């Protein structure tokens, strides 16, 4: 669902509080119609304070960072000025509502009227958009409509920053839309799935079912919180803690001991270190698990009918992880065990590369997980 849309053929620009990521896709030759490949990619750090909680504080500095990042991408030089940009999930309001069947003109008026019942801010202070959600099963005697809104005061600085960078913002899209486009095969799921995007400063929960988002939420448990927990437990700086997090993750010390013994490696020091990392990570991981359970429960008790297949119960059947924090060793196993739901690493190339490919030579699978939103935005630019 875009808020401003002029024409296609644009690159994806994912902006978060501490970094931005760029992806440009390209179509294959005529003899390989429908085949997509990576054209350009890049990323840049955003110093703390320029964006806080999704709100841009300094449009001038952000514009400079965007311009520099676009001009220094790897791969092909980006020649287009047209860009599709992500908007912060924590500032968005999304809701699926039901309306009687009506004409498009009537629908626009009805959505604006109904939105006032769901959006916790005055309509005149928000940008509002909607899309009709097609039923997966059965013909409907009504319309299911996904409405989305963001405060104008949040979006306007994004417009200003992008224009100051010399670019043309053709589409603004809420992060969850881009993430689901990247991770959900063919953008359709016969049963509800939960997408968890673990970012540096927050984690997004996205439930997708049928042809649409059904529920989104953000929490402050994040990849950085995991690193901070290690730094405090080990009394080391953040960079050292990040390295140890990547080295050990949530590997169970007993398993590490057995592996090291089999390799005839001196392991006592590493086992002690591994135990400390494991113990430091347990509290924030338990917090994450409790938050997931709480949000699943809320969705389950508040979800409206979704025109499910016969005997379908509407329960979440699978969880996909994405974002840079998804690479934490052992996380999928612990989440699967505690949630009693299969948890897998998502594949952000599922709608780009032929299966079973999950990476390209220029961008590894592990690195690609941090580019999930940007890949979804780039797909929007080249396909529609």
Image (spheres, helix red, strand yellow):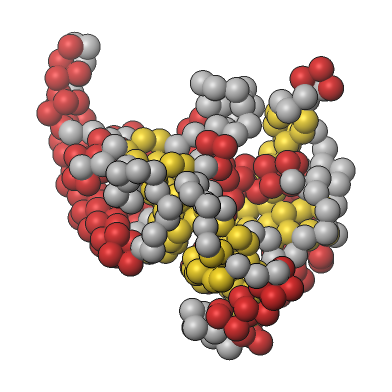
User: Does residue 356 appear to the left or right of 256 in the view shown?
Assistant: right
Q: Quadrant of residue 255?
A: top left
- Residue at x 81% of width, y 65% of height: 163
- Number of marks in the rendered image: 0
Q: Considering depth in this image, is 192 or 236 the residue closer to the camera?
A: 192
Q: Considering depth in this image, is 51 or 13 the residue closer to the camera?
A: 13
Q: Considering depth in this image, is 275 or 31 the residue closer to the camera?
A: 31
Q: Quadrant of residue 149?
A: bottom right
Residue 28 position in % (x across, y down): 78, 25
Q: Quadrant of the N terminus?
A: bottom right
User: Does residue 178 appear to the left or right of 28 in the view shown?
Assistant: left
Where is 227 relative to 331, above or below?
A: below
Work out whether residue 367 can be spotted. Answer: no
- Residue at x 29% of width, y 59% of height: 300
Q: Quadrant of residue 291?
A: bottom left
- Residue at x 47% of width, y 46% of height: 137
Where is 292 relative to 41, above or below?
A: below
Residue 197 position in % (x across, y down): 44, 50
């Amino acid at each position: 669902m875009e808020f401003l849309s002029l024409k296609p053929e644009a690159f994806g620009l994912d902006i978060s509080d501490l970094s931005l990521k760029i992806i440009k896709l390209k179509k294959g030759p005529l003899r390989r119609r429908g085949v997509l490949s990576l054209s350009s990619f890049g990323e840049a750090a955003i110093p703390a304070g320029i964006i806080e909680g999704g709100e841009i504080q300094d449009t001038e500095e952000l514009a400079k960072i965007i311009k520099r990042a676009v001009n220094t991408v790897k791969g092909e030089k980006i020649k287009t000025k047209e860009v599709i940009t992500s908007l912060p999930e924590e500032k968005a309001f999304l809701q699926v509502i039901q309306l009687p069947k009506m004409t498009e003109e009537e629908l626009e008026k009805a959505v604006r009227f109904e939105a006032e019942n769901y959006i916790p801010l005055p309509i005149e202070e928000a940008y509002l958009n909607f899309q009709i959600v097609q039923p997966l099963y059965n013909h409907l005697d009504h319309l299911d409509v996904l409405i989305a809104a963001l405060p104008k005061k949040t979006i306007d600085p994004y417009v200003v920053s992008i224009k100051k960078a010399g670019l043309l913002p053709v589409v603004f899209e809420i992060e969850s839309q881009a993430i689901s486009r990247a991770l959900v095969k063919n953008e359709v799921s016969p049963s509800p799935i939960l997408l968890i995007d673990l970012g540096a400063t927050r984690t997004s929960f996205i439930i997708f079912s049928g042809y649409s988002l059904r529920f989104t939420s953000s929490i402050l448990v994040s990849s950085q919180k995991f690193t901070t927990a290690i730094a405090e437990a080990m009394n080391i700086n953040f960079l050292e803690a990040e390295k140890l997090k990547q080295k050990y993750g949530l590997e169970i010390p007993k398993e590490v001991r057995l592996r090291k013994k089999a390799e005839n490696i001196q392991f006592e020091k590493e086992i002690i270190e591994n135990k400390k990392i494991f113990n430091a990570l347990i509290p924030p991981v338990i917090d994450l698990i409790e938050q997931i359970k709480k949000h699943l429960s809320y969705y389950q008790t508040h979800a409206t009918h979704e025109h499910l297949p016969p005997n379908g119960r509407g329960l979440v059947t699978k969880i996909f992880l994405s974002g840079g924090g998804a690479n934490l060793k052992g996380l999928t196993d612990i989440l699967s065990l505690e949630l009693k739901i299969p948890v897998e690493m998502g594949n952000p190339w599922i709608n780009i590369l032929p299966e079973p490919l999950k990476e390209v030579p220029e961008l590894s699978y592990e690195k690609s997980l941090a580019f999930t939103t940007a890949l979804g935005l780039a797909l929007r630019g080249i396909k529609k």
